[in-house]
Amino acid sequence: MSIRVRATTPTDDQAREALRGKPVAEHRPSENVAKPEGELAFSVSDLSLWYSGKQALTKVGLDIARKQVTALIGPSGCGKSTLIRCLNRMNDLIPGVTIEGNVSYRNADIYGSDVDPVEVRRRIGMVFQKPNPFPKSIYDNVAFGAKVNGFRGNLDDLVESSLKRAALWDEVKDDLKKSGLALSGGQQQRLCIARALANNPDVILMDEPCSALDPIATLKIEDLMRELTTDYTIVVVTHNMQQAARVSDYTAFMLTDEEITGQLIEYAPTETMFTQPADQRTEDYISGRFG
Ligand SMILES: Nc1ncnc2c1ncn2[C@@H]1O[C@H](COP(=O)(O)OP(=O)(O)OP(=O)(O)O)[C@@H](O)[C@H]1O
Ligand SMILES: [Mg+2]
């Protein structure tokens, strides 16, 4: 169950460094990685990734709990988006990417040769930083995936229930024919969440879903995330420490330093992470000393 798109040990960068006589940093995985309680959605181990030979993740290993919110935090460029995109094979779409290691989703290797990446992305949906509704009506935005997949149920019901789950129904129920682009930023983001929910996913990945939103719209999305954990697993990248503390059950702190790019420094229940971080670098980051 191991991914090996192309053999890359040592990496091109490491090989070049070694030729220049520089010692190549030995990466020792962090000891401060908690094991979540209960059922798992993902199990990631020894995950490394290179963009055209340039390393962006180094041997990341963590388990992600089902029906909980897991936050990924860390300074810009530390590999948060790269890691979250590995969870639904979105990086496959980027040319020149090499991945090594294991990502299993409910005990199945999502990079297995018999796995359909389109089905992976349906079950493991994604919401992006900038709301990206299609230039279509609110109704058609939500119904889009179902129509493409030949959904045979009642589309009106699907649109209504998805908009209700995304806490947007009351605001748009009389305007379903209006363009999705005519909504406010926060409404557009909830529309994108409704669109993801209409595909009947199990997991929703969110990469900085609130960074383009004002504080009130942000709180609405945060409330929604908490509500959705009754049925869904949520993994969220955020730069906002208060947000991680408010919404997540578990937090992973990542860092790139001079020697090792995209490493997991600490992973713990959110409360522990924010009150008793085990690693000095975590403490420095969450107390705002860098990043
Ligand atoms: N499509 C890409 N092609 C090449 N390099 C990339 C690509 N995406 C990310 N990188 C590089 O990989 C490293 C990790 O980037 P990533 O976007 O995962 O960081 P991040 O933690 O999400 O940062 P931010 O907080 O700024 O969003 C960076 O050095 C970045 O330049
Ligand atoms: Mg990012």
Image: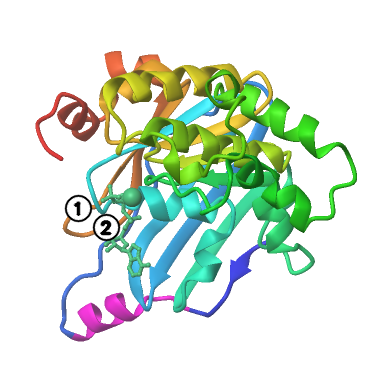
Residue 238 picture location, percent across and down: 34, 35
Q: Which residue is mark 1?
A: 257
Q: Any mark on residue 179, and which?
A: none
Corner quadrant of residue 284? top left
Front-lying residue, 179 or 289: 179
Q: How is the image coloured?
A: rainbow
Residue 99 picture location, percent across and down: 51, 67
Q: Is mark 1 within 8 Å of ligand 1?
A: no
Residue beneath the point at 75% across and 62% down: 115
Please check the rendered image and state whether residue 250 is part of the magenta-colored stretch, yes or no.
Answer: no
Front-lying residue, 210 or 183: 183
Specify whether 254 is left or right of 96. Answer: left
284 vs 135: above or below: above
Q: From where the camera sits, is residue 3 visible?
A: yes
Per the image, label 2 sits on a secondary structure element best described as loop
Residue 204 picture location, percent across and down: 58, 38
229 vs 84: above or below: above
The amino acid pointed to by label 1 is Asp
C-alpha gap between disc 1 and disc 2: 5 Å
Q: Which residues are magenta?
A: 8-19
Q: Which quarter of the image is occupied by the N terminus?
A: bottom right
Q: Which residue is mark 2?
A: 260
Residue beneath the point at 39% across and 51% down: 81
